[in-house]
Image (cartoon, rainbow, N blue to C red):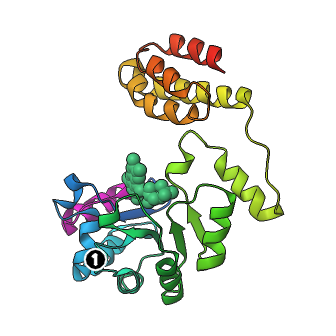
Amino acid sequence: MQIFGSDIESLTFAASQVSNDFNLVDINMGCPAPKVVKNGDGSKLLQNLDLVGSIVEEVVKASSTPVTVKIRKGWSKSNDVSVQASKIIEQAGASMITIHGRTRDEFFSGEVDLEAIKKVKESVSIPVIGNGNIVDEESALKMFEYTGVDGIMIGRASMGNPWLFQRIIHYLQTGEKLKEASNKEKLEIMIQHIELEVAKKGERVGIPELRKHLACYIRNLPNASKIRVTINQINSKNQLIEYLKECF
Ligand SMILES: Cc1cc2nc3c(=O)[nH]c(=O)nc-3n(C[C@H](O)[C@H](O)[C@H](O)COP(=O)(O)O)c2cc1C
């Protein structure tokens, strides 16, 4: 369970509540969203490393399960604090660090700084997870080989492509690539995704939330943009499934 904030009392309260039900408590120190950083939370914390240390120390004390931290490289190009922050986080008792190799100013675009991730890995002894722009087998292997990280985290590329994890694991273990998922497999997973979402949230909330995911599943189909427009006008689960069956 990931928590975010900058108020130590709130964070320790949250950690004490959720740590009984989850395997670990992760503190988000990487989110770049304006509504988050304007409160001093997420990646804004990287401009206040004393507070980073205090937060981690107190959350570790309050949590009954290991505490991990997700960071970015820093706030801006002139503020690469990744190594310094990582040492403070380790010293404060965290069990693992995930680093997204971009600054806050870069949001989600541009190169990922593998060199910075490598330096973080070399500067601490707790496990380090590398993150940023891992989209396929090659980029996953490169993250491991270049930086020496203990694990990788994949974000955007897994949307509409949950097969990616299995493909990467297979490639890392055997050096061979699995075949692309067939349209039949894609359709089955999409239907399962729709059923789960609607069972949890109902059609009124679930269907609009599904649209961005469905747009990712269909992005390689020849008529993707036309299909997306139609999907965005459908409000019922059964109609959505029927339409996707036609498309696939
Ligand atoms: C829509 C969106 C929501 C995200 N939400 C979170 C979040 O709640 N917590 C978090 O640690 N990272 C979050 N991230 C960041 C990703 O975990 C990841 O660090 C980032 O997207 C870079 O990895 P990628 O290139 O594999 O996507 C989010 C990213 C996106 C695009």
Using the image as rendered, state which of residue 138 and residue 160 is in the foreground: 138
- Residue denoted by label 1: 52
Residue 197 spot, x, y in % from top left: 48, 28
Using the image as rendered, state which of residue 43 and residue 226 is in the foreground: 226
Q: Would residue 136 appear left or right of 58 to someone viewing this image? A: right
Residue 147 spot, x, y in % from top left: 58, 78
Residue 147 in view of the camera: yes
Q: Amino acid at mark 1?
A: Val
Q: Would residue 30 appear left or right of 123 to someone viewing this image? A: left
Residue 19 in view of the camera: no
Give the answer, above or below, for where 50 lies relative to 13.
Answer: below
Residue shown at the point (23%, 76%) measured from the top left: 47
Give the answer, above or below, for where 165 lies relative to 52.
Answer: above
Beta carbon at label 1 within 8 Å of ligand 1: no
Residue 3 spot, x, y in % from top left: 33, 58
Question: What is the magenta range?
Answer: 1-20
Residue shown at the point (72%, 51%) measured from the top left: 167
Q: Residue furthest left?
A: 39
Residue 193 among magenta residues: no
Q: Which secondary structure lies at badge 1?
A: helix
Residue shown at the point (53%, 81%) measured from the top left: 118
Residue shown at the point (64%, 13%) measured from the top left: 246
Residue 76 spot, x, y in % from top left: 29, 73
* Residue 149 image-quadrant placement: bottom right
